[in-house]
Image (cartoon, rainbow, N blue to C red):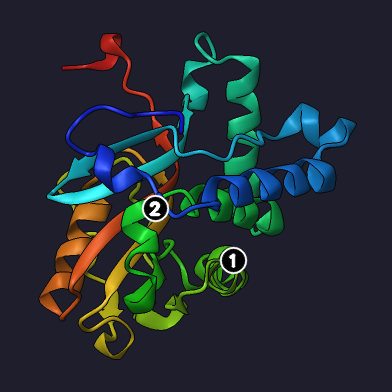
Amino acid sequence: MGLYESGHLAGFMYYLKSGSEDEARFWNNVLIFTFLNDFRKAFYPLDNRFQGFFRLDGSLCLYLYDYCPVRRNDKITFEGKKISNLIFKFKSGHKTDLTVKLFSIAISRIRAIQENKHRAVLVPIPASTREKNRIRYEEFCRKLSADIGIADGYGAITLAADRPQLKGTHGQDKTANLQFHPEYFKDKCVLLIDDLLTTGEGFIQTKRKLIEHGAKFVIGLFLAKTIAFEDEQK
């Protein structure tokens, strides 16, 4: 069925129900027909399989794209620029329908998610401000949860106050301004979704709070994961 057929996480990747891959291919064709015109082909990626998966703080995590930071223009490719375009548009509340379909097709192939749909809820890691969070996630979560047939947990984590942007930073409590509402996720499988994974601290802190407040387990979903360049490693 494609990527990652070996390794100890392979069993989590594949939804082996008969016909599931045919259905995924069908929706891939719909996606291409709907979105693939000259403008979108030039500016946005349309790959719809998770490119990477790994364990982070014990949780299965998956991401669609490798993201090359803008500061590394010396390394970015044409495809990388399309990924950057999609991330920045998604952050500002644009390209919701495209991003929903990319995630939906990719998720349809993941066995660990399909087997837990009956008790799953989609929860976003909140943006830095309430307005950014609403613009980025309210419509997206409503549409994606409906598309994949799970509960919409947009309201599971709310912001008590706005805060500065902390993505990519270390040593900060990134949940200090957040309020958790267990009625959304108690005893459930949480699909914890975010646009970009960089250090992983925000995901780990949020995941631990969800477990502390009663979530059964957490799976991380990311639009992209920041590439770590060797010349930036300490």
Q: Is residue 92 above or below residue 225?
A: below
Residue carrying label 2: 165
Left or right relative to 139: residue 34 = right
Position of the C terminus, as image quadrant, is: top left
Q: Residues within 10 Å of mark 1 (few under 14, many from 20)?
A: many
Left or right relative to 45: residue 191 = left
Q: Secondary structure at mark 1?
A: helix
The span from disc 2 to disc 1 (Cα, nearest Å) is 21 Å
- Give x and y (percent) for residue 102: 60, 48
Q: Secondary structure at mark 2?
A: loop
Residue at (80, 36) in percent of width and height? 40
* Nearer the camera: disc 2 or disc 1: 1
Q: Is residue 200 above or below residue 226?
A: below
> Which image quadrant is residue 193 in?
bottom left
Is residue 82 visible to the viewer in this orientation of the structure? Answer: yes
Q: Nearer the viewer, residue 222 or 130?
A: 222
Residue carrying label 1: 140
- What amino acid does circle 2 point to? Gln
- What amino acid does circle 1 point to? Phe
- Give x and y (percent) for residue 228: 31, 22
> Which image quadrant is residue 13 in?
top left
- Give x and y (percent) for residue 20: 53, 52
Residue at (60, 34) in percent of width and height? 47
Q: Which mark is residue 131?
A: none
Residue at (33, 85) in percent of width and height? 184
Is residue 94 visible to the viewer in this orientation of the structure? Answer: no
- Give x and y (percent) for residue 21: 55, 45
In the rendered structure, which disc, 2 or 1, sits on the residue that comes first in sequence? 1
Q: Nearer the viewer, residue 23 or 208?
A: 23
Left or right relative to 225: residue 103 = right
Residue at (60, 68) in percent of width and height? 147
